[in-house]
Amino acid sequence: MRILVLNGSPRPDGATADMVRAFARGAQEAGHEVRTFSVARMNVKGCLACEYCHGKGNGTCIQKDDMQTLYPEFLSADMVVFASPIYYFTLSAQMQAVIHRTYAFSIPKNVKQTALILSSGDAFVYGPAIAQYYQSIVEYWGVKNAGIYTANGSRNKSEEKRQELYAFGKALKEESAQ
Ligand SMILES: Cc1cc2nc3c(=O)[nH]c(=O)nc-3n(C[C@H](O)[C@H](O)[C@H](O)COP(=O)(O)O)c2cc1C
């Protein structure tokens, strides 16, 4: 299946990127096509709430920034993985901008499953990010949650975490349409 991975960390060699790489290696070895985007390095502006997308735009956004690269990726993906560092108890602002801009298409029709990967300094800081993921992605899109993986403190960039993420990617199976 086609897996879209969004990394919301601005650090190319950070802990989120480390988990994403291990996941991608496993998923590719299992035969999946993995497309990873460092969204924090892309130019994605916040939603203008102009409602062009729900009117004249017919599902397209009026803002012609790097979200135009991501829109077709969302619409052709079978699975989307949201990977982000925890900033102030939630997803990074760059990841939030991407999620808000999905307002244009509302629900990506081909996506059947999603996953969440989070890195943080401390433990027990994931509540708001997980609540948002469940409500605005899993439930709103009507998809299966394939897994939630977290790393904090010394577990960041650890071999144990890499193995966990690799195994997750490697075991992934395509979900049939609901
Ligand atoms: C602006 C900012 C806010 C942060 N807020 C939190 C936080 O609320 N809780 C926490 O445990 N760590 C917090 N951190 C630490 C990061 O989540 C942590 O360093 C993470 O491993 C970074 O991931 P990365 O290496 O992929 O960028 C924050 C870091 C930054 C830069």
Image (cartoon, rainbow, N blue to C red):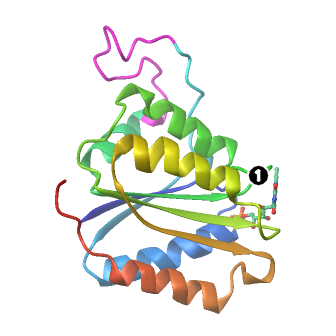
Residue 107's place in the image compared with 18, above or below, is above
Residue 32's place in the image compared with 143, above or below, is below
Q: Position of residue 160 (x, y in %)?
A: 62, 91
Residue 57's place in the image compared with 106, above or below, is above
Q: Is residue 35 inside the magenta stretch?
A: no
Residue plotted at (63% across, 64% down): 118
Can residue 81 be seen here? The reply is yes
Magenta range: 50-67
Specify few, some or many for label 1: CA neighbours under 10 Å numbering under 14, 14-19, or 20 or more: some
Can residue 10 be seen here? The reply is no
Q: Is mark 1 within 8 Å of ligand 1?
A: yes
Q: Position of residue 78 (x, y in %)?
A: 27, 57
Q: Nearer the viewer, residue 15 or 137?
A: 137
Ligand 1 - quadrant of the structure image: bottom right
* Residue 176 horizontal side relative to residue 50, left or right: left
What is the residue that sits farthest to the left in this orientation?
A: 177
- Kindly indicate the quadrant of the structure image that contains residue 108: top left
Q: Nearer the viewer, residue 135 or 11?
A: 135
Give the residue at mark 1: 87
Number of disc labels: 1
Residue plotted at (28% across, 55% down): 112
